[in-house]
Amino acid sequence: MTVKEILEIAYKKLKNAEIETYILDAQIILSYVLKVPKWKLIIEADKKLTSKQQKEFFKLLTLREKRIPIAYILKQKEFFGYNFYVEEGILIPRPETEILVEIVLNKIKDLNNPIGIDIGTGSGAICLSLLKEKTSLLMICTDISQKAVKITLKNAKLLNVEDRVKIIRTDILKGIKATVDFIVSNPPYISREEYETLQPEVKKEPKEALIAEKGGIFFYEEIINQGRDLLRDKGFFAFEVGYNQAQKVANLLTNIGFKTEIYKDLAGINRVVIGEK
Ligand code: SAM
Ligand code: GLN
């Protein structure tokens, strides 16, 4: 079978599984199996696959037909230009979260040897990208999930920053005593009602990484209450928020006398809330 032939079959199969991005997904999987960049598939349309490659391709394609996210199938996801190892049980980092990283980097650019905390670190996407970009930074990151702690450590080693991060399994900030320059978090923020409306792919991700009580606002309240005394003077909170939560979260911060800023993502949605002490 040639590249062109196998792709035609794959498009049909993924289309039948009601996957909107069937062309892209089939090409991503094939380029992974053949270990060539996606654009090369077009100029190598007549190239024949070995039987081993065909077998591997159809194995992965079947997973995609079952609506398993591509990142879980390939066990990797690019975030902020870095490659993160991911697997089932870990939230797949989202492109909109890159904005949160950019904003934090901008706010700490003039600080010498800053220290930060990332709550609910997941794959380590936020925390480890910050460490890669700011070489004098030290980070503490927490997650309640044992798997997240394990994978973040793995990614810290892959990205060569493990000597500047402490990864702790705990509930939000329990047991952490430190004075820090900032606390960043992309916590679970989806309400139970909204969860039901999500795509099948998102439902393959851990519920504990997505759902938050109090209509999605629970973690912001807790992080602000538990974290405000850990922030030094002029220290700040940096939160990713859901599409309708920015004002609510900003109010929680102004209520305790913090100065707030709201930033939009590329889709024009209020996505990041900063609160400065
Ligand atoms: N920071 C990662 C990112 O942006 O890709 C993952 C964010 S995910 C939306 C939320 C994370 O919070 C999950 O990894 C989940 O395990 C973690 N989490 C849930 N409840 C928690 C708790 N009580 N304390 C600490 N982490 C928690
Ligand atoms: N942005 C994610 C989604 O829409 C939610 C991440 C979160 O709850 N922090 O699936």
Image: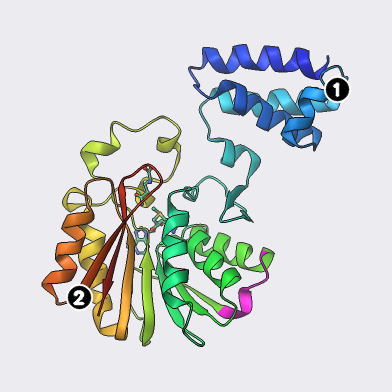
Which amino acid type corresponds to the residue marked 2 in the rendered image?
Phe
Q: Secondary structure at mark 2?
A: loop
- The quadrant in which the C terminus is found is bottom left
Q: What residue does disc 2 label?
A: 258
Tag 1: Cα neighbours inside 10 Å, few (<14), some, or many (≥20)? some
Q: Gap between marks 1 and 2, in whole Å?
A: 60 Å
Q: Are marks 1 and 2 in contact (CB under 8 Å)?
A: no
**Position of residue 160 in the picture relative to residue 173 (left or right):** right
Q: Which residues are magenta?
A: 159-164
Q: Quadrant of residue 257?
A: bottom left
Decide which of 170, 215 is in the foreground and name it. 215
x, y percent for residue 97: 44, 54
Tag 2: Cα neighbours inside 10 Å, few (<14), some, or many (≥20)? many
Decide which of 77, 214 is in the foreground and name it. 77
- The quadrant in which the N terminus is found is top right
Residue 227, relative to residue 146: is it above or below?
below
Seen as rendered, the residue at the extreme left is 255
Q: What residue does disc 1 label?
A: 49
Which amino acid type corresponds to the residue marked 1 in the rendered image?
Leu
**Position of residue 192 in the picture relative to residue 208 (left or right):** left
Residue 158, relative to residue 31: is it above or below?
below
Residue 168, relative to residue 71: is it above or below?
below
Look at 68% across and 12% down and name the residue there. Answer: 9
Dot placed on the residue nearer the N-terminal end, 1 or 2? 1
